[in-house]
Image: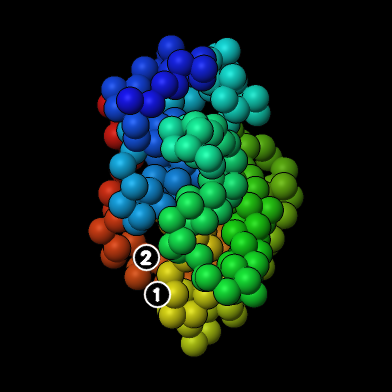
Amino acid sequence: MADLSAFPITARWPATHPDRIQLYSLPTPNGVKVSIALEELGLPYEPHLIDIGKNETWGPEFLSLNPNGKIPAIIDPDGPGGKPLGLFESGAILIYLAEKTGKLIPADPAGRYETIQWVMFQMGGLGPMFGQLGFFHKFAGKDYEDKRPRDRYANESKRLLGVLETRLEGRDWLMGDEYTIADIASLGWVRNLVGFYDAGELVDYASLKNVPAWLERGLARPAVQRGLDSPKRP
């Protein structure tokens, strides 16, 4: 039986199955990256719902695992050397899980780094830009009379979608025939942009061909559907 008592977060969210990966998350575009990866890899895990609406990420227990106060985060009881390892940042967790299992990332070094670059493309581009567009289009920012901030993020989001569109020309997945963590990183964000944020018209999503087909392929995967609903909301 793994001993996770050194992690204060387990006092707030106790581990019923301490031998499984502990996932602290919420089904947001960032959160589902890790739950989808865990489902795709078939790794046993125990999900803990973190309610960001109640500011639970800013409590001392959560901050003890992620000082940046953001979901998702994990504890792997069987980390390097067989010792428990805590990790935050969704991109870092994706790379860790892929390398731990030898799956969802190419074995050859060139393919590995090419995959990681597309994960970083999502981390530095799609996530921040789509998120800001969501704020200015759907949330509090929509009430601003000055639409220049919204339009700035809409234009940049449209440009980034164009990058994806070009990359996916002649490819089923971002790395070609192989479905990887690069796809997992971006699927939830594109889904959110045109679904939850309802920003498809702003970014001219209907003019795209490759991105919508890629999103449809991704959402058709059973593990993706399970991951999109984990941890389950009340």
**Quadrant placement of the C terminus:** top left
Q: Which residue extends farthest bottom? A: 170
Instruction: Report the number of numbered marks.
Output: 2
Q: Is residue 192 above or below residue 216?
A: above
The percent position of residue 31, horizontal first and vertical second, equals 46, 41
Tell me what residue is drawn at x 59 percent, y 19 percent.
Answer: 64
Q: Is residue 55 left or right of residue 216?
A: right
Q: Quadrant of residue 118?
A: bottom right
Q: How many angstroms separate mark 2 from mark 1 (CA)?
A: 9 Å
Q: Earlier in the sequence, mark 2 or mark 1?
A: 1
Q: Position of residue 134 (x, y in %)?
A: 56, 45
In front of the other: label 2 or label 1?
Answer: 2
**Which numbered dot is residue 162?**
none
Residue 152 in picture, x, y percent from top left: 72, 55
Nearer-the-camera pick, 192 or 48: 48
The type of residue carrying mark 1 is Ala
* Label 2: how many Cα within 10 Å (few below 14, some 14–19, many 20+): many
Residue 79 visible to the viewer: yes
